[in-house]
Structure formats: C-alpha cells, structure tokens
Amino acid sequence: MKKQTILKVLAGVALLGLIAAGNAGASGITVYKDGDKYVKMGGRIHLQYHQVDPDEGDSTDEVFFRRFRPYIEGSLHKNWKGKFQWDMGKAEGSNEIAVKDAYFQYTGVKDLKVTVGNAYFPFSREDMTSSNKQQLVERTFVGDHDFGSPERNAGVFLHYALLDKKLELHAAGASASIDPDVAKLDFDTPINRDADFNEGWIFGGRVDFHPLGYLAMGQGDFERELKATISVAAFTWNNDDDNNTFTDEATGLSTSASKADVDTVTGFEISGALRGYGFSVDAQYNLFNAESIDDTFTGGIYEDGETDLENWAVEGGYMVIPSKLELVAGYEWQDADNYAEEWTRTSVGANYFFKKHDIKLQATYRMGENLKGADGVDEDEVFVQAQYVF
C-alpha cells in the first residue's frame, strides 16, 4: 500500500474508533410491555470509510453511512408480531429511504413460523447472516445480492424447526425484481424497485442441519463451543413479462449493450459453518443459471443469452483475545460464461469488539484480481467500519 493510503487508513481507524468507543448500550430496547403486548425499538449504525485503489487510475475514498437503520417491532395479540425497518444510509435520488424488513409473523403452531411481507428469502447462508454479525466488513460473492442471492422479497415464508432445532426446514414464495444490468445478476425487492427492473416470481426452499446442536447465523466464535452446520438450498425465478424495458417486442432482441432483460434464473447453494475454540469458519458454493430474453445476447456475464454464474467463498477468523480481538481472512472466486478469467478477491483484516457485535470496529483490506472477468484488471480496497447496534 502507498504511504498516502496508509496514512488515510490510520486516520480512518482513529476516527471511527473514537466514535465506537464513545458509545455504550445493550441490543434492543423494550419501551412498552403488558402481557402479550409489547413495543420494541432498535437500530444499527454503520459508519464506513472506503478506499478504492485501482492498478490504473487514481484512488478514491469516502466516509459515509453504510447502514443507518432504525426499526420498530411490536405485538397486540399472542403469537403475532410485526416489524418494520428502513434504511436512510442508502437514500438516493427520489428514494429518501429504503424499506428493509416489513412483515408480520405468526408463531401459534409449535416450532413453526409463518412470515408475510418483505423478508429474507431462505437462500445463501452468508446473505441470511445479519450485516451486524459479519467477520469481513463487506459480504463476499456468495452473500451479495448483486451476484445472485435473492436477499429480501415480498411474499410468504415458512420456517419449521425439528429435533430440538438440529434440523430446520424453509419454504418461500415471493415477488422478486431483477436489475437487468448485464455485469451482475442483481436481485432487488419489488418494494424499492426502479422503473426498469424486471418483475417476476421466486419459489424455493432450504434445509439446515446442525449435528452438534443449533448454530445461529452469526460469524465469530464468542461461546467457544464446538458447533457445525451444513445447508442446501435452491430456488427458481421466472419473469412475468410485465416490465421488459430493454427488449424490442417485434424482434425479441435487446436494445441495450449494458442492459438485458432476464427471463429465468435457477439457483443452488451448498454451505457449511464451523465454530469452536475461538475459531470461526464459513464456506459456501453457489451456482446460478440465468437466461436473458434475447437468446443471442452476449455481454457482461452472458454468452449467447445464457450464463452459469459460479461463486465460491471461504472466510474465517480466530479470537486472539477472546471476545475482544479477532483476526480474519477470506478468499472468494467468481466465474461466468463470458468471463475471460475468474474474478478473485483475497481479504485480510481484524475486528475489535467493545461489546461483542453490538459495538465493534472492523478493518478489511481486500485485493481483487481480474475484476468482472477482465484479464489483468486488478483493484485493492480498504474498508474501516464502526458499528453500533441497539
């Protein structure tokens, strides 16, 4: 890293560290409770410094709110609750806020949860793991909605736990949108859609097996108990043909070199996690088959109207000072039919916990090679983030 870059990073660490250290509190606040009735309020604040240093061209940096999300959760009736959460960190253009969680849930049947609204689709362990509980500042390819993970969608979600939560079953059906940018396979919720998003329906399921006892989806080993998880998941998405902005109706051909309407997507995941003795490791493989409406289109990830987009990632860490200081590293790999070379990213970093995941300071240095599949196009990034959750 250049001397100027090092100085900027150190300054960013110092600034964000002071912000994190100057706060204290517990996660979640119940502001009203009377029997089954309650109101709970909370939120997350992620202040981030991000620097991009390409091999060619000038480096850029910024400080911004990566996430600024309040939420309200409550209930008036036994076995029912509702929650809504919004993000002001992603405000742009005419969207002053982005709707995140917005659902109601029924838990009146033993071990079954029925959720209706805008919620996480049960695909990708890393994507389903809260941004509050990630080891690296940013998610890898396997957990990024830009590269095939559906994230939040508007629909119905079922979760059933068996064998004292050693086995979990998920099923879901929802409305999901896709940004037809050919450089990505970008799923978005229809609640925050842009005018050119493709619209469609997604259906899928998931199985999580915890042979040594239930392991929650949070990275880092604070408990130092040996736990493990292995998971499989799959989904299918189909365009409902309501909004194909970049396809000529007469010829069926794409009208843009950078945008191509998506016809179908199928996704498959196998993932695993291991915790114990201060170590935390997550590994995941995703495979997506996507087809554009124009079956002759070549560009971005697509070749002759189709692509197999593959994502691999492994990341882990070790608590060198239990519950205080964690050293982390990760390696991720992506390939698509139209890539000249595989896109890889290697990350190293450290996390300092003031109050576990509630208050922490993170730093990640990520080295990218062959960006977007282009041979020899490399880029390094620095992330420093202060997190406060209440």
Image (cartoon, helix red, strand yellow):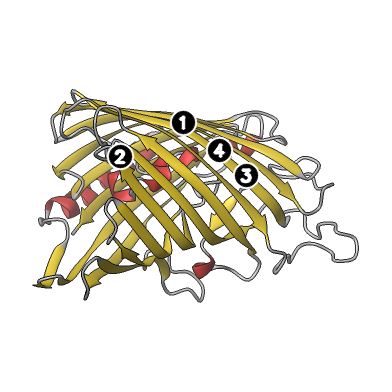
Quadrant hosting residue 82: bottom left
Which type of secondary structure does the marked residue at label 4 adopt? strand
Asked whether residue 13 appears in the rendered view, the answer is yes
The x and y percentages for residue 360 are 20, 46
Quarter of the image where the C terminus is located:
bottom left
Query: Would you name the residue on which mark 2 appears?
Result: 363
In the rendered view, would you say 39 is above or below 316? Answer: below
The x and y percentages for residue 212 are 25, 27
Residue 158 is tagged as none
Looking at the rendered image, the disc whose residue lies closer to the viewer, 1 or 4, is 4
Query: Would you name the residue on which mark 3 appears?
Result: 266
Q: Image check: 254 left or right of 3? A: right
Task: Say whether disc 3 or disc 1 marks the residue closer to the N-terminus.
Answer: 3
Task: Say whether disc 2 or disc 1 marks the residue closer to the N-terminus.
Answer: 1
Task: Say whether disc 2 or disc 3 marks the residue closer to the N-terminus.
Answer: 3
Image point 45% across, 42% down: which residue? 206
Query: Would you name the residue on which mark 1 appears?
Result: 313
Mark 1 nearby-residue class (10 Å; few <14, some 14–19, many ≥20): many
Residue that protrudes farthest toward the front in the picture: 109
Q: Look at label 2 and name its amino acid.
A: Ala
Query: Would you name the residue on which mark 4 appears?
Result: 268
User: Marks 2 and 4, how far apart in space?
Assistant: 31 Å
Q: Are marks 2 and 1 in contact (CB under 8 Å)?
A: no
Which type of secondary structure does the marked residue at label 2 adopt? strand
Quadrant hosting residue 228: top left
